[in-house]
Image (cartoon, helix red, strand yellow):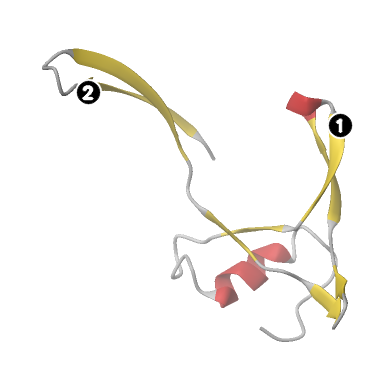
Amino acid sequence: MLTVREDAVLLPDGKTARREWIQHPGAVVMIPMLDERTVLLERQYRYPLQRHFYELPPARSSRARNRWQPRSASWSRSAATPRRAGSI
């Protein structure tokens, strides 16, 4: 899912330097509402920080579809939470 890259870059002073960066395929997020006042959050353990957080469910985009359309997000969001979107 993540690719670590390293590039040689030309600096304004003419010197070269190395830059490391992470390539990510992209993601979207939707705000799942159970009713007009209730937002669905997931309790997620994050290993690097050694603690739990409350987060919006992730919705990974699909390369086969337009990455930023809501339909793409609603399809992949269902894997993160057992609820399904009633409407978008």
Disc 1 target residue: 51
Residue projecting furthest to the bottom = 87
**Answer yes or no: do the residues labelled 1 and 2 have beta carbons within 8 Å?**
no
Q: Is residue 16 above or below residue 81?
A: above
Q: Is residue 79 above or below residue 23?
A: below
Residue 7: x and y in percent read: 28, 23
Q: Is residue 39 above or below residue 55?
A: below
Write the residue at 77% across / 57% down: 80
Could you say whether the residue bearing mark 1 is in a helix, strand or loop?
Answer: strand
> In the picture provided, is 17 more to the left or to the right than 57?
left
> In the picture provided, is 77 more to the left or to the right than 33?
left
Q: Residues within 10 Å of mark 1 (few under 14, many from 20)?
A: few
Residue 34, picture quadrant: bottom right
Q: Residues within 10 Å of mark 2 (few under 14, many from 20)?
A: few
Q: Quadrant of the C terminus?
A: bottom right
Could you say whether the residue bearing mark 2 is in a helix, strand or loop?
Answer: strand
Residue 64: x and y in percent read: 44, 65
Residue 19: x and y in percent read: 34, 21
Residue projecting furthest to the front = 13
Q: Is residue 3 above or below residue 54?
A: above
Q: Counting residues from the N terminus, which is met first, the one under dot 1 or under dot 2?
A: 2
Disc 2 target residue: 9
Q: CA distance from mark 1 to mark 2?
A: 37 Å
> In the picture provided, is 49 more to the left or to the right than 14?
right
Residue 40: x and y in percent read: 84, 66
Q: Amino acid at mark 2?
A: Val
